Amino acid sequence: MNPCSIMPSWALVLAVLLPALAGAAGKDAAKVSAQELLGLIDKRMSFTSDYKGTVRMREIRKDGVERALEMLVYRRDKTKDLLFVLTQPRSMAGGGYLRVDMNLWEYNPLVGQWQRSTRRANIASTITCESDFDRSRLNEDYTAKDDGVESVDGTSYRKLLLTARPGVDITFPMLRIWVDPDNNIVKRIGYSPSGRVLRTDIIRSYQRLKDPSSGELVYHYKEVLEFEEEEGTKIVVHYDDVELAPLSPNIFTKAWLEGRNR
């Protein structure tokens, strides 16, 4: 899919998104460096409290075949703990992914075995990846430089070109992001090392939450539309039922996920 072909929808999404985000807390992105802006984005999307949420995905392939998936996401940002538990479709229920010491492990409940995966791998055979559901780590993973400004309906969006830091295991070696005046990413394109477009995301909406541990307002995706370039697959990702509350440390263990299937 030519990325230019999605520009009308991208412009339309922004026209709808902007009023919803108007007045959101945030510093003027034009006053900070590109790298500092990544730090601001990471901070406003990280939680001091533990996180639990339900991710619902609707995947539509180029041939028109659709499927729905659902999984529970558990996060503890301060210790980088992360667990995904698949709940739908029934054929995949009980499987999951657990990050241990920055290594991602995939669990197959049919055979009761764990297999080591990577941050680059797709989750549940979709076009999504670990970073879609993890805390924002842009400032840790990338170096950034300004890439101009794009105006849509009178609003200017700051563009940044991000290049992965050496040695970082990440899905997209290069990213280009569009940031609105309130420091919200509204569009991003992931590239291969050669510069080929791999995936384009439109962030359709955010949800604003109060972190009970820090008392700060934090921002989390509500709905994201992702386009995969090579196969023409698209997927709509909803982030629902978010709870910011303490979780048992036992959740972030292989034994806990295995126990759900007994």
Image (cartoon, rainbow, N blue to C red):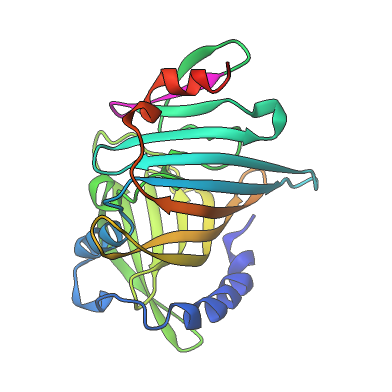
Quarter of the image with the N terminus in it: bottom right
Quarter of the image with the C terminus in it: top right
Question: Would you say the magenta stretch is mainly helix, strand or loop?
Answer: strand
Q: Residue at x 57, y 39 (%)?
A: 71
Q: Position of residue 248 (x, y in %)?
A: 35, 33
Q: Is residue 55 above or below residue 22?
A: above
- Residue 76: image quadrant is top left
Q: Position of residue 238 (x, y in %)?
A: 57, 55
Q: Position of residue 9 (x, y in %)?
A: 62, 71
Segment colored magenta: 100-108
Q: Is residue 35 above or below residue 32?
A: above
- Left or right, 206 with respect to 223, comes to left
Q: Position of residue 204 (x, y in %)?
A: 54, 66
Q: Is residue 133 magenta?
A: no
Q: Residue at x 44, y 49 (%)?
A: 195
Q: Which one is nearer the viewer's eye here, 45 or 64?
A: 45
Q: Which one is nearer the viewer's eye here, 57 or 163?
A: 57
Q: Residue at x 47, y 66 (%)?
A: 206
Q: Is residue 85 above or below residue 45?
A: above
- Residue 130: image quadrant is top left
Q: Which one is nearer the viewer's eye here, 59 or 120?
A: 59
Residue 233 makes an appearance in the image: no
Q: Is residue 7 above or below residue 76?
A: below
- Left or right, 190 with respect to 111, comes to left
Q: Residue at the far right: name it.
A: 64
Residue 189 makes an appearance in the image: yes
